[in-house]
């Protein structure tokens, strides 16, 4: 249960921080009404997605479900891990929430038109940000929780992350630039990849030694592999740059 809550909590922090940055830009540039309306509309769509997908999972044979979500989690996790490794190695620039906030604000300020039209555009920007990042959170929650019937537990991890980010964001009223986003993405990539291998193995009928404890071993393997890749990629990048 704890690994599921931890994975959804950490993954959700990353996604909510990115969505919050855009909503904050909308609110401070075009007013809080379009920001709140756009956010509320996106949350309504996400709730509808959860209500539709949740009950349908019980009709899918557990082994097929585990294999399907395992493969998707592995693809998703490896994608996060790859970017985190390249950023840690200096190959890709670190993600900067302050820069993202400035870019979104500049884009909103550069638009022209009637005040109502600008508010509509701003509301759509908030809606899009919350919906896209929220869909990733929903996917992670369902994928991690569905394999062992831990949907409620996984949902609690995501909810806790939302409350934490929104609470801190409302208090400081500026982008959460100090959140160690790349470190979180590295950790989440490791955990999602471990879950992906575990669920895919379960779906294929693999009897893991130690049952759920094998998740710790798989996590350690991906963590060590990721750290080694950071060193290798960093050394190669410095050689090329020199």
Image: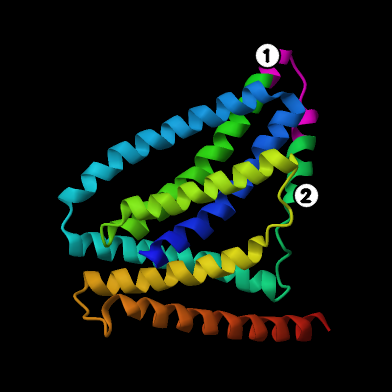
Image location of residue 184, percent across then percent down: 59, 64
Q: Is residue 134 left or right of residue 213?
A: right
Q: Position of residue 224 (x, y in %)?
A: 53, 84
Q: Position of residue 234 (x, y in %)?
A: 71, 81
Disc ID at residue 116 = 1
* Residue in front for this viewpoint, 159 or 50: 159
Q: CA distance from mark 1 to mark 2?
A: 27 Å
In which quarter of the view is residue 228 placed?
bottom right
| Residue 203 is one of the magenta-drawn residues | no
Q: Residue at x 44, y 30 (%)?
A: 44
Q: Which mark is residue 99?
A: 2
Task: Depth check: give the residue in front, 19 or 87.
Answer: 19
Q: Which residues are magenta?
A: 107-118
State the scheme by which the image is colored. Answer: rainbow
In this picture, is 138 found above or below 150?
Answer: above
Is 134 located above or below residue 36 in the figure? below
Q: Could you say which is closer to the camera, residue 179 or residue 139?
A: 179
Q: Disc 1 or 2, which lies upstream in sequence?
A: 2
Query: Is residue 190 shown above or below 40?
Result: below
**Residue in the picture at 74% in, 64% down:** 93
Q: From where the camera sits, is residue 133 visible?
A: yes
């Amino acid at each position: 249960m704890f690994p599921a809550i931890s994975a959804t909590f950490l993954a959700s922090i990353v996604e909510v921080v990115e969505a919050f940055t855009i909503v904050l830009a909308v609110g401070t540039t075009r007013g809080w009404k379009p920001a709140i309306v756009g956010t509320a509309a996106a949350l309504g769509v996400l709730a509808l997605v959860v209500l539709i997908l949740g009950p349908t999972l019980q009709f899918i044979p557990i082994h097929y479900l585990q294999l399907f979500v395992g493969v998707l989690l592995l693809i998703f996790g490896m994608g996060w891990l790859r970017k985190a490794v390249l950023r840690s190695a200096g190959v890709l620039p670190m993600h900067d929430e302050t820069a993202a906030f400035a870019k979104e604000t500049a884009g909103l300020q550069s638009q022209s038109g009637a005040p109502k039209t600008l508010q509509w555009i701003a509301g759509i920007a908030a809606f899009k940000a919350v919906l896209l990042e929220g869909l990733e959170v929903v996917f992670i929650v369902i994928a991690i929780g569905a394999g062992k019937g831990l949907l409620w537990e996984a949902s609690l991890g995501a909810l806790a992350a939302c409350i934490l980010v929104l609470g801190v964001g409302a208090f400081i009223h500026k982008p959460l630039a100090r959140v160690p986003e790349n470190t979180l993405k590295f950790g989440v990539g490791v955990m999602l990849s471990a879950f992906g291998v575990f669920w895919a193995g379960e779906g294929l009928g693999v009897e893991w030694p130690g049952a759920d404890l094998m998740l710790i071993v798989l996590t350690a393997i991906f963590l060590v592999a990721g750290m080694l890749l950071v060193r290798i990629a960093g050394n190669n990048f410095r050689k090329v740059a020199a």
